[in-house]
Amino acid sequence: MFRHLMIAAASLAVSACVAGPPGRAADAPPLEAVPSVDVARYMGLWYEIARYPTSFQKDCEGTTAQYTLRADGRVDVLNTCRFGTRDGEPRSAEAVARVMQGSNGARLFVNFAPIPLLAGDGNYWILYLDDGYTHAVVGEPSGRFLWYLSRTPVISAEVRAQLDAAAVAAGYDLGLLKETEQK
């Protein structure tokens, strides 16, 4: 048991170190997720449009996330990226997510680790979601992570402006965004 706790603590420490600097302004208001998300409608394939750079997505292009609702209410997550270029060799990471109690589906705890870690307030907050469930901005309270997601691999300038506005309103620095090459 002690060994498992040490591994979990080390994993948290490493993830804190490799995630990068916070991208939210120090004086930003407390982060708020959207009021509610119909989790079943959120399921399916999403294309990553842009992100804050992270060590675990180093050299990733053509990134997608596939969410599948399980019978127990949790969500299977399959993140896939192409190594180096959008046509590179695919690599994938699987996870299981659960909706954080009291969040109306807007905050999830996604666990990629082989050992369950403490969920806290969740590490996947849906900060913006259009009415059609076609575009989203996802972040988390530390400000180290930010993703723009779309049901299509390319978005219009108008949609991009909406995503940018949502990120800025949440206190994120757009200068840290890395564009994701999609097909």
Image (tube, rainbow, N blue to C red):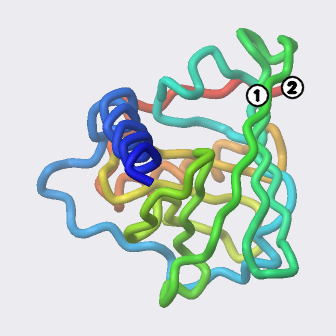
Q: In which quarter of the image is residue 44?
A: bottom right
Q: Say which residue label 2 marks.
A: 183
Q: In this view, does 166 lie to the left or right of 158?
A: left
Q: How crowded is mark 2: few (under 14 residues within 10 Å), some or many (20 or more)?
A: few
- Asked whether the beta carbons under mark 2 and mark 1 sit within 8 Å of each other, the answer is no
Q: In the picture provided, is 183 more to the left or to the right than 135?
A: right
Q: Mark 1 points at which residue?
A: 81
Q: Which kind of residue does numbered mark 2 sit on?
A: Lys
Q: Earlier in the sequence, mark 2 or mark 1?
A: 1
Q: Residue at x 79, y 20 (%)?
A: 82
The residue sitting at 84% across, 73% down in the picture is: 70
Task: Determine whether 139 is above or below 103 in the image.
Answer: above
Q: Which three-letter amino acid code belongs to the residue tagged 1?
A: Cys
Q: Nearer the viewer, mark 2 or mark 1?
A: 1
x%, y% of residue 9? 35, 45
Q: Position of residue 37 (x, y in %)?
A: 65, 80
* Residue 91 position within the rendered picture, expressed as x and y whole percent measured from the top left: 80, 24
Quarter of the image where the C terminus is located: top right
> Residue 85 appears in which quarter of the rendering?
top right
**Please, what secondary structure does the residue beneath circle 1 have?**
strand
Residue found at the very far left of the displayed protein: 27
Task: Return the residue nearer the eye: 87 or 158.
Answer: 87
